[in-house]
Amino acid sequence: MYNPYENNDLNKNSSDSDTNETLHQNTEQEETQTQGETSYTAPRYGQSYGNQAQNPYPTQTGWQYGSQPQGPNTYTWNGAGQQHSPAPYYTPAQPPKAKKPRDGKKAKKYLLRAVAAVLCCAVVSFGSVGIFAALIQTGVVNVESTGSDKTAAFTLYKNADSGEDTSSVVSSDQLTRQQAAQKVIPSVVCIQNYQISTQGFFFNNSDSDSDTAGSLAGEGSGIIISEDGYIVTNQHVVDGASKLEVVTSDGASYEATLVGEDTQTDLAVIKIEATGLTAAEFADSGDLQVGDEVMAVGNPGGLQLSSSVTFGYVSALNRPVTNSDTGYTVKCIQTDAAINPGNSGGALVDMNGRVVGINSSKIAATEYEGLGFAIPSDTVQPIVTDLIDYGYVKDRPMLGITGAFLNALKATWNNVPSGFLVDEVSSEEAAKSGLQRNDIITAIDDTQVTSANTIATYIADMKPGDTVTLTVYRYTSGESLQIELVLSENTGLSGQSSNS
């Protein structure tokens, strides 16, 4: 059985002819502890684990779907093209009985206090407005018009009922577990990925729309973000689909179209033609603290276990998790709420029933228990905006290379400096710069490369087209070089692979 943790340590006594290749084998397989961070590696679903992880960060080595259909009669279609299955659907709980009115005297007492509070607030507000108006008139405060032709960016931070921006709202009056679950379940859907079969199991039927659908390749989860049918999910849930089907918590089925995808953060937006849907309420993930109670909502195993809820706690924040397919690192929420194949793309929710993260991966092995990750809502917000507006992430810079960080210990073994070891030069601008495979980037401008995230952090606030100066140690000649490189755009579309 394949073991993702095979030990491919460098042999420091190896000949010079072998060192060139073993540098890359070593950097991806050896356990590294950088700046106090523990390393993990997540296997593909269905693979077993061996020794402890050897990468500097948790690594998503394969995105996980739900279970495959168990027989030809598992799913049926009606004449309208809608799908039905024997899976149980979510039934909303009945609303609680109305509370009895307060005693008349007490009610009057509370009313007088409320009126007094409102009057005080009004006096303060009018005074503030008057002062502000005076500052404008005297020129102390300058107010400029931004124009009316600019469209507002799509925001997740809206109350599903009122449309208010709730990104900074912190409520101390938490809902019960039951209330929080009832609030968010109608906003979480099952997403089915159909792909054309290449094994001869599928027979075309010219009289049916299913001739271009293919067979069910996998299932995942998604979150409704607008009442008119926009849904956010993981990119791996929709990857390679010839047809996407969305099943809501009440069993209604819709065909979906892909709006945009980002392989780097593993996020995607799809759209169904529907109105009046229950959009989830999002909260600012920056308000989370370690120890906060959260729940995961999704479809573990697929439609048969739809609208499942599991509870847990925030185990850690800003945990770097690296996607091994692209090398891109995202700082995630770590939780012990049970997250299984099929939960990908589902919601991580606080106890006010608000989404704080998108469940994305899980280390599922006997050595690990209760170790799941979610993409924070603060990371999701700008990605979703770009995916809806452009279909890809705009103005995200990259060097246009792949590789791995070479720490001081491994560098000493090979008698080279520590830094970022280049494995592949993947962009046109990087190739023009003269950067080569096996070059070691020791500094970017005046910043020393001391960790795997140094380069990504440094260029995060830059734009494609900006120029950086790299200090490079060339292994083949042993010389140190200064290389100027123009940053490329990291769109995150399928087929683009670059981690820096």
Image: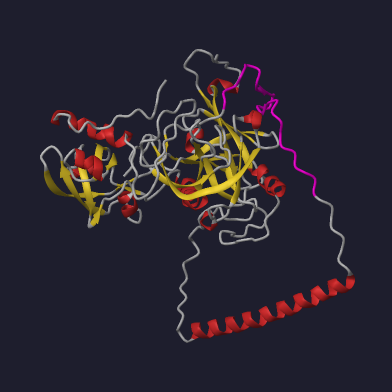
Q: How is the image coloured?
A: secondary structure
In reply to whether residue 72 is colored magenta, the answer given is yes
Position of residue 88 relative to residue 407, above or below, is above
Q: Residue at x 40, y 25 (%)?
A: 3
Range of magenta residues: 67-95
Query: Residue 405, can we see it?
Result: yes
Query: Would residue 486 appear left or right of 119 to someone viewing this image?
Result: left
Give the quarter of the image for residue 20.
top left
Q: Could you tell me which quadrant the C terminus lies in?
A: top left
Image location (x, y in percent) of residue 222: 57, 39
Query: Would residue 18 appear left or right of 60 to someone viewing this image?
Result: left
Q: Residue at x 36, y 36 (%)?
A: 54
Q: Residue at x 84, y 56 (%)?
A: 98
Query: Residue 420, can we see it?
Result: no
74 or 486, nearer to the observer = 74
In reply to whether residue 142 is colored magenta, the answer given is no
336 or 119, nearer to the observer = 336
321 or 186, nearer to the observer = 321
Image location (x, y in percent) of residue 348: 57, 45
Q: Could you tell me which quadrant the N terminus lies in?
A: top left
Query: Would residue 442 appear left or right of 479 to someone viewing this image?
Result: right
